[in-house]
Image: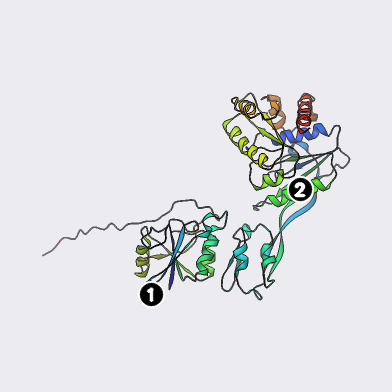
Amino acid sequence: MKIGIPSNGNDLSQAFATVFGRCSHFVIVDSTDQKNITTYPNEARNAAGGAGIQAAQSLINQQVDVVIAPRMGPNAWNVLQGAGVKIFIGINGTLQENIEAYLAGKLVEMTGAASFGPGMGRGQGRGMGRGGGRGMGRGQG
Amino acid sequence: MASGKGGTGKTTIAVNLALYLAKSHKVALFDLDVEEPNDNHFLHFELTNFKDVNISRPLINESICTHCGLCAELCEFNALAVLSTQVMVFEELCHGCGLCSIACPEKAIKEKSHRLGIIQKSKNQNNNLLFYEGKLRVGEALATPIIHELKKIAFEENHEYIILDLPPGSACPVIEALSDTNFAILVTEPTPAGEHDLLIAIDLVKQLEIPFGIINNRSDVGDDCIDRLVKKEDYELLLNIPHENEILWLYSNGLPLIGTTTKFDPMFSNLWIRIEEVVK
């Protein structure tokens, strides 16, 4: 299975990019052989408009099955959905950490596009709930 | 009649210069600010629909499309995405250039017409002043094709003088409106924003190689930044218009300066003399 991730560089130690359409590179990993990595620069990065569409098209051309992204505008979302690509919400961390989290079933599937107009990346909604549970059990006996 | 900044007085000067010239010449005034055409709020002409402005958008015949992806690859505006079984058209991004239908090796792309807006024309044919305005439909994003169509009308018809009232700014609609004109009047005001946006407008007309002059509106409000700029760069200052309550009153009541009173006739007469001097 091919997994596509927006990145700011071209190896798995790089940080997960916080934007989809205008990230610097895409990294594609084969889940059955994680050493099998393809990277390419995101040509949509400097597009005047429709960057999300062009970026999504490039991932489809690479025949990805899964995309891990921070959030996505409606146009890019529609392109990937139309091609049957599954989209998961990434976590803050490296690409490696995201792939491991995905393979461990820890990533949540994105249920819809961000609700703003095309190409209008506004809003900072991140939803980064950190688990904070501390053990408070008292020993009995 | 251009400006960088909005609200500097393009419409007021365009309308009144047109009314002044129409006393002795055949004049055509075109309101190219198709997102908010305001000239007729001061002219009160009866308008009639002249023509629709349409652009072509792609219509994909999926039964013969091989989904080769060439159209999406070529589209400058990323308005197409090609999946293995379908082509997605993002209509709001399409600029109507038609490249996709020309390039399609299977001839699977036809063009369908989409209405962007309308051009209206004044009914008063016997008057010395003919007026046209373009109106972009609410929800549409492309002003440039309507401006292009208005200019085609302007240059095809035989007018002694053509005055084009432009939208503010310096992007595609303004470039389309300025191109092939003989002279640009840049209307500004002596404020930081007025000066900043004037410099952008000057940069633009210089690149388009259009001779220009400057009108400094509300010239006694703000500071002397425009005077200093004009002196330093040796630009043509065509007119200073001082802040005056009567101008504001007429403006607020939708009345032109020329025709309502004769008080401002010398101002526009002087402006026209200056323009003729500079153009020569």
Q: Residue furthest right?
A: B126
User: Which quadrant would residue B242 be assigned to in this image?
Assistant: top right
The amino acid marked with disc number 1 is: Thr
Q: For mark 2, what is the residue?
A: B150
Q: Chain of mark 1?
A: A
Q: Name the residue rendered at 43%, 53% in the picture.
A: A125
Q: Nearer the viewer, residue A98 or A137?
A: A98
Q: Nearer the viewer, residue B177 or B88?
A: B177
User: Which quadrant would residue B278 be assigned to in this image?
Assistant: top right
Q: For mark 1, what is the residue?
A: A32
Relative to A116, B162 lies left or right: right
Relative to B99, B73 lies left or right: left
Q: In this picture, is B46 found above or below A16?
A: above
Q: Nearer the viewer, residue B52 or B195?
A: B195
Q: Name the residue rendered at 69%, 71% in the picture.
A: B107
Q: In this picture, is A74 found above or below A1?
A: above
Residue B205 percent location from the top left of the image: 67, 40
Q: Chain of mark 2?
A: B
The amino acid marked with disc number 2 is: Leu
Residue B179 percent location from the top left of the image: 72, 45
* Residue A139 marker: none
Viewer-nearest of discs 1 and 2: 1
Regarding mark 2 in the picture, which secondary structure is present there? Answer: helix
Question: Would residue B24 be seen by someone viewing this image from the given angle?
Answer: yes
Q: In this picture, is B133 found above or below B223?
A: below
Residue A21 percent location from the top left of the image: 50, 58
Question: Would residue B35 be seen by someone viewing this image from the given angle?
Answer: no
Q: CA distance from mark 1 to mark 2?
A: 60 Å
